[in-house]
Each structure stands twice: as structure tokens, then as C-alpha cells.
């Protein structure tokens, strides 16, 4: 089963801009760097990677879960760093919903970032990481033209699960990882941002060799090309593409169990 997001890989038009925002302003720690690539540690188990490319980019949406008790501190940190919070049409910057709170902001490439906190998430199971106090990468937005087909493929092929389903917007969940399978016609809140599919490579942490083999078999049955890395007959990393996105499954220890979830983008 998929247990968490292990890495999110995005393109950028400026590595220097990425460094100023993610390193300088958000205070993330760079753990790997070359001329055109930089990787930041988000948590003990998750990284965020940017690769420079001379490409027109569509903004991605992703969300960091922070402890409910630390939400105000994390938001204060953003304000102190001079990072503008996005506003709803009524001017509000913070969203309060049934089980939590969130704020949105943007990076230098225009990606739509979110800090989100849920009152039911146990923050004593994993250690909040860095100055933003990130527990885990919770959401990665993956707009698709045919949302229902994409959602069903994620369930059938990767064993992800849904609670509620709609033709336009779905959380498709494995452990702490929430893929947002959303329509390209449904705009992102709170600024009605066009949901163009971003150039995105999602790396999932996956538990169990049997699960990896199941996914590999499913890809084979569907005629989807894949590659593996690892020992000879073992696939401890599985790479493939579908619906315009790149995916990697990487065998990992299970994420500490955490209670899930309601639905909120
Ligand atoms: Fe979101």
C-alpha cells in the first residue's frame, strides 16, 4: 500500500528563485544540489525537488500538514517572512472548516501552496519538521480532463481509496498522501486559479514487496511501460507514467499510523 508522499518533483524556471523562496524565506534545508536541481527536506520522510527547465509552467498545488496546535505559529512565521497570504473574494486570508484551518500562498513559479491543520491529526506520532513545523506533505493536486477515469485508475492500479466521490473533485488517498484528482475545469481555491495540469513527478512511499509486485502486474496488464530499480528480480523502486504525470513507487517503512481524514482542498 501507499503510505506517504516521499518526494514531489517540480520544474522551475529559476533555481535561484527557488533558493530565495524555499531556502531563504521558508527556511527549508537543501540536502542535494547541482547546477539545475535542488532538493529540500520537508520532513524526515519527504523531500521537495526542483529541476530548472526552459518550459512554460502550469502552477502546481500542494499542501503541508502542520499540527493544529502550531497552526498560528506557522502562519505567523509566513507573515514574519513577508510572504503574502492569498485572499478569498471576501478578503479573508484564513479558511476555517469543520475540522481544521488553512492558508494559501504562492512561490516564485506561481505554485499554489497551502498550510493546513486538522484538529483530529495526532501530532505526537511524528515530529514536526523545520520552522514551518511540517508533519507531512498531505496534498498533491493532479488535474485531469477525465477525472473519473483518472480516479478509478488510481484506485484500481495503485490501491488508493476514496471516501466521497464526485465527477469534478476527489481526494484519492493512501496513508497520509492525498492525491487530488480534480477537473481541469474546476478552479483552485481561494483565488480561482485555472487548474492546468502541472509538470509533476510524484514519488510515493510504498509498503510491502507484495504490493509493489501487484502494481507491477497491473501496469503490465494495462500495457503501461514501467522500469524498476533495485535487486535483480526485485523491484524496490517502480517508475511509470500515466495521465500525463510521472510516478515512482519507492519501498519504504510504513508511515506512523495517523488518523485520517475528512475532505477539504
Ligand atoms: Fe489544498
Image: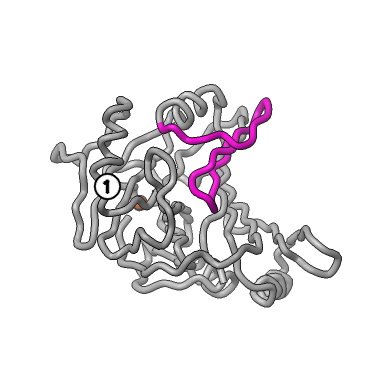
State the residue in front, 24 or 108.
24
Report the coloring of the rendering.
one colour
Locate residue 218: give its quadrant: bottom right
Quarter of the image for the C terminus: give it: bottom left
Asked if the magenta segment contains residue 211, the reply would be no
Is residue 222 shown to the viewer in this render?
no
Task: Tell me the residue at 46%/32% (across/down).
Answer: 22
Task: Tell me the residue at 30%/34% (across/down).
Answer: 77
**Extreme right residue here?**
232
Q: Does ligand 1 reach within 8 Å of label 1's beta carbon?
A: no
In the rendered image, residue 131, in percent from the top left (x then y), is placed at 39, 38
Count of marks, rendered view: 1
Which segment did they paint magenta?
26-50
Residue assigned mark 1: 71
Left or right, 200 with respect to 260, comes to: right
Is residue 118 shown to the viewer in this render?
yes
Q: Secondary structure at mark 1?
A: helix
In the rendered image, residue 186, in percent from the top left (x then y), is placed at 35, 52
**Extreme left residue here?**
90
Asked if the magenta segment contains residue 36, the reply would be yes
Most common secondary structure along the magenta stretch: strand
Left or right, 41 with respect to 81, comes to: right
In the rendered image, residue 19, in percent from the top left (x then y), is placed at 51, 26
Task: Tell me the residue at 61%/59% (across/down).
Answer: 242
Mark 1, residues whose alpha carbon is within 10 Å: few (<14), some, or many (≥20)? many
State the residue in front, 85 or 164.
85
Quarter of the image for the N terminus: give it: bottom right
In the rendered image, residue 88, in percent from the top left (x then y), is placed at 20, 41
Amino acid at each position: 500500500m501507499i503510505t506517504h508522499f516521499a518526494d514531489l518533483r517540480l520544474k522551475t524556471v529559476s533555481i535561484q528563485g527557488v533558493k530565495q523562496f524555499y531556502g531563504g524565506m521558508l527556511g527549508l534545508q537543501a540536502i542535494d544540489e547541482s547546477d539545475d536541481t535542488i532538493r529540500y527536506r520537508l520532513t524526515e520522510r519527504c523531500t521537495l525537488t526542483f529541476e530548472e527547465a526552459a518550459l512554460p509552467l502550469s502552477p502546481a498545488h500542494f499542501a503541508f500538514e502542520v499540527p493544529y496546535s502550531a497552526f498560528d505559529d506557522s502562519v505567523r512565521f509566513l507573515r514574519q517572512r513577508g510572504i503574502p497570504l492569498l485572499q478569498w473574494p471576501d478578503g479573508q486570508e484564513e479558511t476555517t472548516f469543520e475540522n481544521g484551518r488553512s492558508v494559501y500562498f504562492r512561490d516564485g513559479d506561481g505554485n499554489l501552496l497551502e498550510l493546513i491543520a486538522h484538529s483530529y491529526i495526532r501530532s505526537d506520532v511524528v515530529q514536526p519538521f523545520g520552522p514551518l513545523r511540517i508533519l507531512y506533505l498531505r496534498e498533491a493536486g493532479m488535474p485531469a480532463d477525465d477525472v473519473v477515469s483518472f480516479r478509478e485508475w488510481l484506485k484500481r492500479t495503485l490501491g488508493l481509496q476514496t471516501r466521497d466521490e464526485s465527477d469534478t473533485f476527489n481526494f484519492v488517498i493512501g496513508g497520509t498522501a492525498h492525491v487530488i484528482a480534480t477537473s481541469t475545469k474546476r478552479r483552485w481555491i481561494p483565488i480561482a486559479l485555472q487548474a492546468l495540469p502541472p509538470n509533476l513527478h510524484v514519488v510515493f512511499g510504498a509498503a510491502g514487496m507484495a504490493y509493489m509486485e501487484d502494481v507491477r502486474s497491473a501496469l503490465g496488464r494495462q500495457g503501461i511501460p514501467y522500469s524498476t530499480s533495485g535487486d535483480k528480480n526485485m523491484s524496490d523502486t517502480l517508475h511509470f507514467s500515466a495521465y500525463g504525470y510521472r510516478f515512482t513507487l519507492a519501498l519504504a517503512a510504513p508511515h506512523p499510523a495517523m488518523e485520517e481524514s475528512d475532505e477539504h482542498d
